[in-house]
Image (cartoon, rainbow, N blue to C red):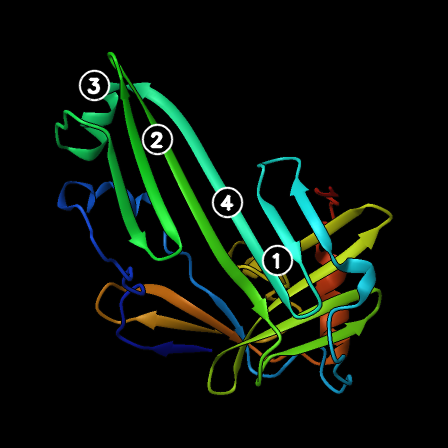
Amino acid sequence: MIINKTTLCPSLNKYHFITLFAISVVLFSCEPPVYFLAPQPPGVKNLPEIPPAYRADYLNTKDSIRIIISANMVTQYETEFSGMTREQLYRDIDTVIDHDTLVYVSPNWTVEINLIGDSAEYISRKVDTVFLNAPGNMIRKWQGFIFLNMKAEKDMWQVYIMKKNTNQLYFDELLDSSEIDSVNHIVEITHVIDSVENKIIEYYLDPSKKELSRILKKKKITFNFLRQ
């Protein structure tokens, strides 16, 4: 099923924004979000809070993303560092700067550029609340997974799942845009199209328990997060 819809990628909530960085900060791609039309799994009772066994500080051994899980919240800390020559920096941002620069992209995201001789370093720091146990959001447990249902819009949820293995944790979206093609044969998926730019901007689905079980079996479960 395909729906035509005109929209734009959500605008950055900028303050104290430095114009020269307007292009370079938007280097990240706006991947189409995947929304579920009902909390997952369907028909499973809600938990009052995230189970104690999951509450800890975890570090992803692959990309150094850190998450902290408490009874009612999952917070993600992401730090990205890269070094380059000044020439590369100026080429990437299409601007010449002659002093260290700090950009406040949003209240939870800063980008720092430090100039060191002929070199430069880029440091991006983000803090995101991935899940908050607030009205409309739901925590459920099924088939060994914890499901964190985060209300996005009316009758739509973004869903994260996690699974423990001793001191290791799997944590990810239940389904992201890169996995859509692999589950098209399992469940009906609605593709929302931006009619102006002619590209997919959102996916909707409403799996049954049987379909959800098949989706979970397609997931590549890797326990990348290590308890600290």
Q: Answer yes or no: is residue 40 visible.
A: no
Closer to us: 221 or 133: 133
Residue 153 shown left or right of residue 46 in the figure: left
Q: Quadrant of residue 81?
A: top left
State the separation of the CA atoms marked 2 and 3: 13 Å
Q: Are marks 2 and 3 in contact (CB under 8 Å)?
A: no
Q: Name the residue rendered at 29%, 51% in the picture.
A: 105
Task: Give the residue at mark 3.
Answer: 87
Q: Name the residue rendered at 34%, 71% in the picture.
A: 193
Instruction: Work out whether mark 1 precedes mark 2 in sequence or the reverse, and give the earlier one.
Output: 2
Q: Quadrant of residue 102?
A: top left
Residue 227 shown left or right of residue 187 in the figure: right
Task: Give the residue at mark 1.
Answer: 182
Closer to us: 205 or 225: 225
Query: What's the amino acid at mark 3?
Result: Glu
Instruction: Work out whether mark 2 precedes mark 3 in sequence or the reverse, and give the earlier one.
Output: 3
Give neighbour class at mark 4: few <14, some 14-19, many 20+ (Cα, 10 Å). some
Picture coordinates of residue 85, whole percent (x, y)? 28, 17
Mark 1, mark 2: which one is toward the viewer? 2
